[in-house]
Image (spheres, grey):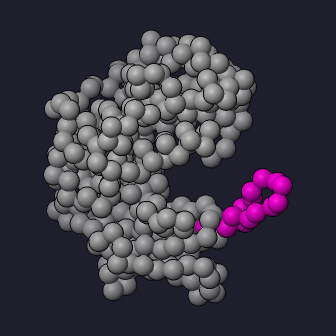
Amino acid sequence: MKRVIALILSALLLAAFCGCKKTPQYAPDPEETEKVTVEELLPDWQASEKDGWYYYKDVTPQMVRDFTDRRAAEGFTLLENEEGKWGKMLYRGDAWINISDNAESEKNCSIQVILRTHDGGMGAQEAFALISAEVAANTRPWTNTANAPRNLAAVLEISPEGFYEATGAQVFRALFDGSPYKDSKDLAFSEATFICARKGALEVRSFSAAAADIDGDGANEAITIGYGYGSGVVDFIFESFGIKNGELVSEARTVYTMKFGKISLTARGGKPYMVWEKQVEHPGEDVTFDDPVEFELLVENGDVQINDPDNLLKALISGSAYYN
């Protein structure tokens, strides 16, 4: 389990451009009928759920194969390695199904379903073209450091509610047909996140995004938080983007090192906030988290600042020089 989860997290964070196996071509979405739900796309096995992942025990390789075959018959495309082991991805225009497959070695598997969001703006075909161009240009190489091919297979909009209306930008996940590691055969896909506006796309390291006026100029910015590359510590990259005449501009980027915990972004009253839940260790028991605390985010002198007047984040270290 640990090996597969590590592989999948690496696939999300460390894919990099090294040329394409073929020219990316957008695959049209299936005709929309009723909106699909997460429950409709999961297998009918006994499961426990945590943070959007569904965990299954007593699973055989044949059960996993039957499940992927059923979804393929419903219009999903399957990405997996030649051995059919470890991580798998099923993708369709309205949903992706991420599978951490340990059925053969540990008789279990984990599944995450990501549904498309769409509040307006550009569709997947236009975003596919913009992201393809940005992947080829590789204007922000620090967002990915692995040396592997990146053949774009699909995109899926994951914009938070109201994000497009507030900023004119949209958030898309990009799925690449190929391992995130050069010459590796464990995974057959990798993922990345892009912000798209009318005149282009930029790759971001982001697991949470929000739209708000972070710099007080009267216009909303797109704000993201993503994981950094710290070894033995947890780095979070905060970045703010302005949209000027349809162009995305990175206005501030800062890296913070913090203690383990849950972190996300939210917006309220036109202002952005970091939501922090400190991780609490209990020897011999499951990890728990403190109640969430919100900290307003500001931009000052080109850095994203966390407003912490009560000094609650005592372990926080700012390091804005990283990843420039």
Residue 130, visible in the rendered structure: no
- Above or below 106: residue 274: below
Residue visible at 67% across and 67% down in the picture: 278
Q: Single out the residue that lies furthest toward the right.
A: 284
- Residue 83 or 211: which is nearer the viewer? 83
* 278 magenta-colored: yes
Q: How many marks?
A: 0
Task: Give the percent coordinates (x, y) of residue 84.
Answer: 47, 22
Residue 180, visible in the rendered structure: yes
Task: Give the percent coordinates (x, y) of residue 105.
Answer: 63, 27
* 7 magenta-colored: no
Q: Quadrant of residue 179?
A: top left
- Residue 175 or 266: which is nearer the viewer? 175
Task: Give the percent coordinates (x, y) of residue 81.
Answer: 41, 26
- Above or below 234: residue 36: above
Judge left or right: residue 299 versus residue 131.
right
Image quadrant containing the C terminus: bottom left
- Residue 23 or 310: which is nearer the viewer? 23
Residue visible at 20% across and 58% down in the picture: 139
Image quadrant containing the N terminus: top right
- Above or below 270: residue 104: above
Q: Quadrant of residue 239?
A: bottom left
Task: Give the percent coordinates (x, y) of residue 138.
Answer: 20, 53
Residue visible at 62% across and 82% down in the picture: 314
Magenta extent: 276-291
Residue visible at 42% across and 67% down in the picture: 237
